[in-house]
Image (cartoon, rainbow, N blue to C red):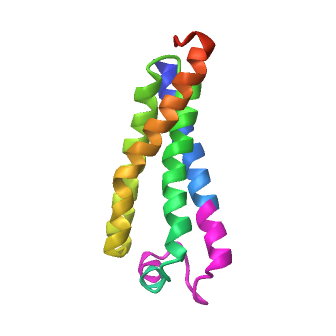
Amino acid sequence: MLRNIAAVIAGLVVGMIVNLALIQLNTVFFPLPDGVDMTNTAQLKDAVQGMPAAAWILVIAAHLGQAFVGGWVAARLGASRWMMLAMIVGVLSLAGGIANAVMLSVPAWVWIETPFYLVAAWLAGRMELARRAGPTGRA
């Protein structure tokens, strides 16, 4: 049980690192306006409102990458119930994504990504189940 809890925490941490790395990469292609402090919610909200649609592609990839990589790490490190561990990371990533979207007032079309958090985590869990099953087909 402790190993599974640690696996979920590790999955969340690694997933967040992936997310933050891709968000930082996005600022290379689409720099924030001068003077925007990413720790200031009001300034960040204003900057998000002015982002071009193309900038959202990497943002969406960051969010789904968080759910996928985090879910895979949790499933890979867990002692049992690998799909459940991946899905816990997916659900928690989804909850964080929704909270962030509400806080920053993202464009309405960006909400299309939300169900894919769970799909990404599910795919990561399935991938780990397949790896564990090996050629015999049993996990």
Quarter assignment of residue 46: bottom left
Q: Which residues are magenta?
A: 22-45
> Does the magenta run of residues contain 117?
no
Q: Is residue 130 above or below residue 20?
A: above
Quarter assignment of residue 101: bottom left
Residue at point 49%, 53% (across, down): 64
Residue at point 48%, 37% (across, down): 123
**Seen in the image, is 69 located left or right of residue 48?**
right
Q: Is residue 28 above or below residue 34?
A: above
Residue at point 52%, 66% (across, down): 59
Residue nearer the viewer, 34 or 109: 109
Q: Quadrant of the N terminus?
A: top left
Quarter assignment of residue 106: bottom left
Res. 7 visible in picture: no
Res. 122 visible in picture: yes
Residue nearer the viewer, 96 or 75: 75
Residue nearer the viewer, 98 or 129: 129
Residue at point 41%, 83% (across, down): 49
Q: Position of residue 19 (x, y in %)?
A: 56, 56
Count up the numbered dots.
0
Q: Position of residue 126 (x, y in %)?
A: 49, 29
Q: Position of residue 4 (x, y in %)?
A: 49, 23
Residue nearer the viewer, 54 or 89: 54
> Does the magenta run of residues contain 31?
yes
Q: Position of residue 71 (x, y in %)?
A: 50, 38
**Seen in the image, is 100 located left or right of residue 51?**
left
